[in-house]
Image (spheres, grey):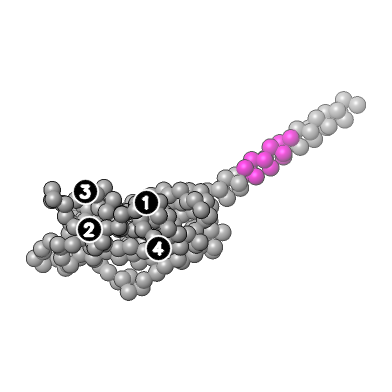
């Protein structure tokens, strides 16, 4: 009789352990699913279902020659639902302020004003500028890919070859691409990560999508 009770206890213990293990595995799977649908996109499920929303192969061969790194004014912005940004339209490209070189905040505000008008109300505007830079410097959005709730924006940059005399641009190089909100998650947080052609992270922005 005692042996039978002992056996029952052992079986019960293994059953409870199995239930705990199953719960742990399920929790881990749920966590993996949650992360895979967010910033991390290393799982095969997310990679296989990723979407290329935009690609310009013409700037895929651009080269950055500068050994001192990218321009100090290099900055990016993401604006959702243009009609909610501003009623004012700023035409043209970013220009210097009366005080001299505009700050990153001033450049982004100018871009917000420019794209905060009718025609961009159902778009996600992805914007980038090098700020003050040499004449032959250029910036362009090369590729935009959606991995779950991560929007990966690859940016192409180029400048003059080494040992070449440099002069500054009068108008700052800019790049912009408007993505229809229909191609993005309907609601919730979207992380936008800007990377260079080698995959090095340049900047990250979080946007709350509402439709």
Which residue: 37% across, 51% down?
85
- Residue under label 1, please give it: 85
**Circle nearer the N terminus (3, 2):** 2
Where 159 falls versus 16 (above or below)? below
Which residue: 23% across, 61% down?
93
- Residue under label 4, please give it: 119
Identify the residue at the far front of this view. Answer: 87
Which residue: 20% across, 64% down?
137
Instruction: Estimate the spatial distance between the alpha carbons at disc 2 and disc 1, rounded to whole Å.
Output: 17 Å
Instruction: Estimate the spatial distance between the alpha carbons at disc 3 and disc 4, rounded to whole Å.
Output: 27 Å
Is label 2 in contact with label 1 (beta carbons under 8 Å)?
Answer: no
Count of numbered badges drawn on the protein: 4
Identify the residue at the far bottom of this view. Answer: 58
- Residue under label 2, please give it: 94
Instruction: Estimate the spatial distance between the alpha carbons at disc 4 and disc 1, rounded to whole Å.
Output: 12 Å
- Residue under label 3, please give it: 103
In front: mark 3 or mark 2? 2
**Circle nearer the N terminus (2, 1):** 1
**Circle nearer the N terminus (4, 1):** 1
Task: State the predominant SS element of the stretch in magenta.
Answer: helix
Instruction: Estimate the spatial distance between the alpha carbons at disc 1 and disc 3, rounded to whole Å.
Output: 19 Å
Which residue: 21% across, 56% down?
131
Residue 135's mark? none
In front: mark 2 or mark 1? 1
Magenta residues span 16-27
Is label 4 in contact with label 2 (beta carbons under 8 Å)?
Answer: no
**Circle nearer the N terminus (1, 3):** 1
């Amino acid at each position: 009789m005692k042996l039978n009770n002992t056996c029952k206890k052992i079986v019960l213990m293994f059953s409870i352990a199995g239930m705990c293990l199953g719960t742990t595995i399920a929790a881990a799977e749920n966590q993996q699913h949650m992360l895979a649908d967010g910033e991390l996109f290393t799982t095969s499920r997310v990679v296989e279902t990723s979407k290329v929303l935009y690609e310009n192969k013409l700037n895929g061969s651009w080269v950055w020659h500068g050994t001192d790194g990218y321009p100090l004014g290099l900055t990016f912005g993401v604006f959702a639902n243009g009609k909610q940004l501003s009623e004012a339209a700023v035409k043209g490209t970013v220009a210097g302020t009366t005080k001299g070189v505009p700050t990153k905040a001033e450049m982004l505000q100018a871009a917000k004003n420019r794209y905060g008008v009718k025609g961009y109300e159902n778009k996600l505007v992805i914007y980038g500028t090098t700020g003050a830079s040499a004449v032959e410097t250029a910036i362009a959005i090369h590729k935009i890919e959606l991995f779950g709730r991560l929007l990966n924006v690859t940016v192409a940059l180029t400048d003059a070859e080494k040992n070449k005399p440099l002069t500054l641009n009068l108008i700052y190089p800019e790049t912009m691409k408007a993505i229809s909100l229909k191609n993005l998650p309907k609601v919730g947080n979207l992380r936008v990560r800007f990377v260079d052609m080698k995959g090095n992270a340049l900047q990250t922005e979080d946007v709350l999508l509402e439709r």
